[in-house]
Image (spheres, rainbow, N blue to C red):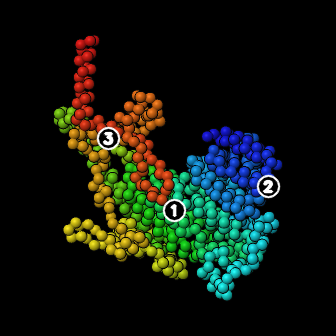
Amino acid sequence: MESSYLARQILDRCNILLANRSRYISKEEFARAVLQTLLGDPSVDLLLLKPHFDSLHADALNRLNALIGFESTVFMTIYVNDSLFDEFIELFSRHCIRSPATVKEATESVYMWLLADYLQYLLPVDEQKLNLLKNSTWISAPFSSLPTSAVTSPRRLLRPEVLAQCAPLEHVSLRSGAFKTLYPRLLQFVGTMLSHVASLSNWPSVAQFQVLRIILDHYLTFLFSETEDGDFASLKLLLLRKPLFVEILQNFLERLLRNWPLDESYCLLIEIWQTLIYHKLLNRCSDEKYKLFVQMSAQYFVDLIETQIQRMLTTDTKNLVESPVLSYAKENIFRCEPILGFFERRNLPTIDYLRALCQKLEDYRNGIQRKLDATHRSRYRSVLAWLLQLLFSFAYIAPVNMHLLSAHIADLRELIVQLSRRPDWMRDSDLQNTFESTAGAINKSSNFSVLNPKIPDHNTDRWTKMLFLTPHGRLEVVNRQAKFDYTKYSRQISDAFPSIGYWDIRPVANFLHQLSIRWTDAWLVRYLRQHGRDSVISRFASAALLSGPSPPRFVPVFSRYVPKHPPRLRLFKLGSTANLIYVFLSILFTLLFFKIFV
């Protein structure tokens, strides 16, 4: 969808809403119509609309700002109404979840401009925005009738410091009654947005990742920024002592880092993870905030590096070499001093991670080199051997760019040497105690690593030789302290998928299978995917040459919708003896026909 067409569509909708404003009975009814028209309609995608400087886009942006901008009268109506505010947050978050926009399109979109506008007012990071927030009567008006006491129950007999340690945030008494009217909406917007954007009930979109990254970055900037207001300063410390959303974010990142394809969007997931373990303002905040954040990140997010390493070790080496993930990890993780310091304090085997990746790439390169050498040596054999190879096999070609593969190996070796020569981390004693105390509260065992997984406690049946987990072994698996290693079984699966049948000629089937992989994105295959049902000929060709759509290798059981792989070229079926006989007879009869009648 072109940006100009979308801008014209949004401008027309905004003009219709403004023209019909007097027809609505109440402000709430008009606000709900605005939300459903601009955010709830699937045909409108604000993540595809860019704020260009021409008159059309400028008019559309002004109309949007007048209707759903933070300082608009419609947003004032939404803010003071509980049900409207909940509906607004849900529609605003669902709008990015269903968007097909790429990372670049989402970053430069009007949606991100609106999101930044909401965040800078609801989560002020400077004194000017904070004073504007506190002095706006319409912001604090809906909560002026709240009771002055934080808890109207026997728990109010407890001392405030005891209550603050064990009670959730809504039960913590704040000193200022005016401030007490501000922070519920602040936490409601951020908390509800994160619960929707980091939800595992739907298949995430790439734009959803970008929205999550921006919200987290601004939220942490809000926590680390200093303020002269005592109530806001106490709230920021309270949010660091009792961190919100960490369980939701941990589950979201852990599952997606394990199952998401290794493409540019996976780098965005790593960037979100980096934001949660190290922030740009971390070194400029107070020591208390620094220790609280480090304790939170060490407990929930630092160990997710093992999930990323496991994902790279188990994926296909060709995809790993060609994807941008390995280069991104080398530059932004293993060359980042603060992150390496966190790994050392958590006693994570950083060098072992790099050695495992380097060994995987070296084994892959050695296998390719052996096949290339064998093909090169076959040129000097007899003419009969060369002819047989030409008829029943094919000249082996490296499946990846060997220069790129060698460059990755050289970079990993250089990183290993640098980390080996790296001096011991100058550890602060208090910070080290924080890491050690946090490590005891984590479910994972200190000896457990993706490189040397622990086998769970089990019993072996003496007759069937089947393995059965003991109750203790089940707890180890649930807590992810141990697991069985299935890699040796996966290696036994033939690379020449699919399996060769009894009547299939192996060299021909392998050759056709490699051709299917090489030509699966050719223009003819793409045409048959799109127009396979248009005519009798296309239906016959697609049924003979293409396989049906299949689910991805990693099927997320937490998702309601799983996209399928498109149909792929399958020429290996032509490698059977019967098909070769048919082809041979067809060629023979064709030659006889031309010999007789031509």
Q: Which residue is mark 2?
A: 26
Labels 1 and 3 touching (C-beta < 8 A): no
N-terminal-most mark, 2 or 1: 2
Judging depth in this view, the residue of 587 and 502 nearest the camera is: 502
At 46% from the left and 65% from the top, the residue drawn is 305
Q: Which residue appears farthest toward the front when viewing the image?
A: 25
Q: Which residue is mark 1?
A: 252
Q: Amino acid at mark 3?
A: His
Residue 442 seen in the figure: yes
Q: Amino acid at mark 2?
A: Ser
Q: Position of residue 374 (x, y in %)?
A: 24, 44
Q: Check disc 1 and report its element: helix, strand or loop.
A: helix
Tell me the CA gap for discs 3 and 2: 66 Å
Position of residue 65 in the picture relative to residue 170 (left or right): right
Q: Amino acid at mark 1?
A: Phe
N-terminal-most mark, 3 or 2: 2
Q: Which residue is mark 3?
A: 513
Q: Check disc 3 and report its element: helix, strand or loop.
A: helix
Position of residue 196 in the picture relative to residue 593 (left or right): right
Q: Check disc 2 and report its element: helix, strand or loop.
A: loop
N-terminal-most mark, 1 or 3: 1
- Quadrant location, the C terminus: top left
Find residue 91 and report its image quarter. bottom right
Question: In the rendered view, would you say 492 is above or below 504?
Answer: below
Q: Position of residue 174 (x, y in %)?
A: 71, 78
Badge 1, how many Cα within 10 Å: few under 14, some, many 20+? some
